Image (spheres, rainbow, N blue to C red):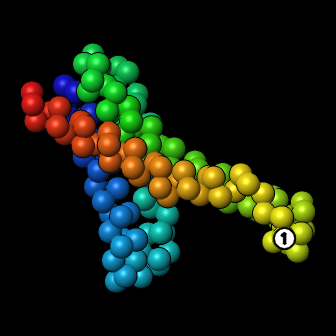
Amino acid sequence: MHSRLGWGVFWSLLAVFLFTVASILTPALGAFVSLGILRLAPALLLLPLGVALVVLIEREGVRRRERFFLLLTGLAAASRPVFVLLHGLVYTLASYILGAELWVRTRLEDEPVFFVLALVVCPIVFLVGAIGTLVLAWER
């Protein structure tokens, strides 16, 4: 990536991701983050930053391998909040439509899938994209 704006968005995404991981793994930071808007801030930042990175990649002439890793990073960051919302939406709608007692007994199969995508797959894909981007930038 050639522009300063693109690298700024990339580093901002990396900082928000590291803040999110630190808040999950560190109990003291997790307790601080659970207060108010700080709990939603990383999710509110990941979506627009991920979309901005993808748009900047499309505008610039980025090399093929670097473009692949940057797209992985941007799409994984943008899709994580979407999967979190889908998880909550499917859970809420299914428990409302089926009723709480029937929902506890049946448990639709789609609801845990969005949860695993948001908490396991998206962070792994994000790390692969970020590390690949940094390695390619280091080689250049």
Looking at the picture, tell me which residue is in the foreground, 131 or 47: 131
The answer to whether 8 appears left or right of 45 in the picture is: left
Residue name at image x 27 percent, y 33 percent: 6
Q: Is residue 38 in sight in this rendering?
A: yes
Question: Is residue 138 depicted above or below 26 in this figure?
Answer: above
Residue name at image x 44 percent, y 69 percent: 38
Q: Circle 1 is placed at which residue position?
A: 105
Question: Is residue 125 depicted above or below 41 in this figure?
Answer: above
Rate crowding at label 1 as few (under 14), some (14 to 19) or many (20 or more) other CA atoms within 10 Å: few
Residue name at image x 28 percent, y 55 percent: 15
| Image x and y of residue 9, in percent | 30, 41
The answer to whether 55 appears left or right of 4 in the picture is: right
| Image x and y of residue 50, in percent | 41, 41
| Image x and y of residue 14, in percent | 29, 50
| Image x and y of residue 61, in percent | 27, 16
Q: Quadrant of the C terminus?
A: top left
The answer to whether 55 appears left or right of 116 in the picture is: left
The answer to whether 110 appears left or right of 116 in the picture is: right
Looking at the picture, tell me which residue is in the foreground, 29 or 35: 29
Secondary structure beneath dot 1 equals helix
Type of amino acid under label 1: Arg
Residue name at image x 69 percent, y 56 percent: 111
Q: Is residue 84 in sight in this rendering?
A: no
Question: Is residue 19 depicted above or below 25 in this figure?
Answer: above
